[in-house]
Amino acid sequence: MRLSIASSTLAALLLLSGCQSLGLGRAEVSVPATATLGDVVTLANSSGTSTLVWQRDSEQYALQSLGLGGPLRVSVSRLDDVTHALLLWGGLVVIPGDGQDRIVAAEDASPAEARHVDRALLLAEALPPATFVLTTCPLPGEVGSSKDLRRLAEQWGVHLSGVDNLVLAGPADRVTRVLRAFSAI
Amino acid sequence: MKLTLICLATAILVTESAQAGDLLDFPIPDSPVVIPANSDLADADEFTIEDLIALYSKVTGQHCVMSAETQAYASNTPATALTGEDMTIAPERFQETFEAFLMVSNFVFTPLTADEPRLFTVNSLYTGARSTIKSLAMYLPPDRLDEAAAHPAILFTTVVNVPHTDVRQVTTSLRSMFPDPNTQQMLPVGNTHAIVLMGLGPNVVSFAQLLKVADEAEGRAHEERMRAHEESKADESAETSQACDVSEAKGVRVAGA
């Protein structure tokens, strides 16, 4: 059984490396210089890397221009992350759903809709940056207090609720920054 | 077949995560970069911050996203130094020089992605972005703080541990050194000996150094106070035992009289 796993992994790695050296799986899409946030989302959806829909109240953000100096070439494998980075830049978050993820203005996103994730997943940066998440903090044994956490959360625009067991809710990238700073106290 | 698919997925994940880069690991241009002097150019050809950003994007292969409001400021702000001569910048110094040009014109630079395509954004502090700019601050762990010194236009947040300092007192007394809460902050952390610092790279580094120096001085002063206290305690006990000896001797004499 072990031999089978090892040989399958080796075969998969060889296959992957072969595909990459041939340029397969590295398909690219081009984002035009005049693109808006809405164009990038449409591109991500049509390339099959994302299933994003705009929340009705946040649709006006789709018209926001990226102000790119020239066309941007993105490999399809990176398109989801790039879309998230741009949405976060535009003040938006992505609320994960079953089958379709909703794009919502960060200021309108309700913590009740955030996806609960383990802190380890956030610290490993395993989630696309604009994913709207919540996690609990502090963990037993951590020195910092709720007041300290509140200050850090305020700085990065992350929601904080609760009294003793606090809940941080916000885009994955910003919540991770709060957690990293908090753990350094 | 299922096993092979799972292994393929694992291999993809491993390959992708192994490629994850560092936000501060900026591409270096292939050759020296020349920034033209404005004195030789007609007003219409003036080399602006917008031109500088385009040049930076071209030579480093990065892409800028910018709000229309910032773009308007960037296209109207001249970028060159006052010397009136073209400026040739060594490739390894270009990132810092580029950021210095941005910083002196009140623009903040923020890297958005660490992997290809490398994206960054520039925000003018004259726009509405000023009030929310601190949410773009990068967190830098204390052991990497030195790296911030080379990034004059990037906002950083870090935590400084000062074990001998009363953090509340020191942050209150130094508050006047942080006039703009949007781009500079120094927050005491509750009942611990930590301070959260936020600001542009070189400022954060120099404030962290200042706090460390003050903390070391406070540590030495504390040690001296402890030593003085121990010495005074030792003197007191010596005096007490001397007094006891005298009274004992007197008592003996009285008893012997």
Image (cartoon, rainbow, N blue to C red):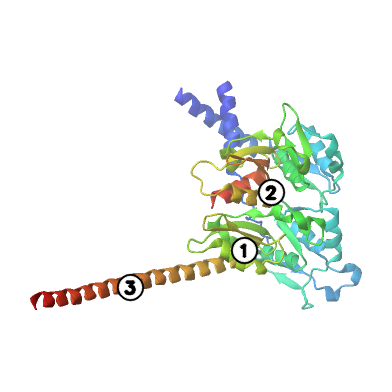
Looking at the picture, do discs 2 and 3 lie on one chain?
A: yes
Q: Secondary structure at mark 3?
A: helix
Q: Which quarter of the picture shows residue B156? A: bottom right
Q: Amino acid at mark 1?
A: Val
Q: Which mark is residue B204?
A: 1
Residue B183: x percent and y percent? 71, 61
Q: Nearer the viewer, residue A36 or A13?
A: A36
Q: Nearer the viewer, residue B70 or A164?
A: A164
Q: Amino acid at mark 2?
A: Thr
The chain to which mark 3 is attached is B
Left or right of A28, for residue A5? left
Q: How far apart are labels 2 and 1 at the CA level?
A: 23 Å
Looking at the picture, do discs 1 and 3 lie on one chain?
A: yes
Q: Is residue B132 above or below residue B34?
A: above
Q: Amino acid at mark 3?
A: Glu
Q: Which quarter of the picture shows residue A104? A: top right
The chain to which mark 1 is attached is B
Q: Is residue B115 above or below residue B235?
A: above
Residue A44 seen in the current view: no
Residue B217: x percent and y percent? 48, 71
Mark nearer the N terminus (1 vs 3):
1
Residue A105: x percent and y percent? 79, 41
Q: Secondary structure at mark 2?
A: loop
Q: How far apart are labels 1 and 3 at the CA level?
A: 40 Å
Q: Which mark is residue B232?
A: none
Q: Nearer the viewer, mark 2 or mark 1?
A: 1
The chain to which mark 2 is attached is B
Crowding at mark 1 (Cα within 10 Å: few <14, some 14-19, many 20+):
many
Look at mark 2 in the image and give the residue it sits on: B113
Q: Nearer the viewer, mark 2 or mark 3?
A: 3
Crowding at mark 2 (Cα within 10 Å: few <14, some 14-19, many 20+):
many
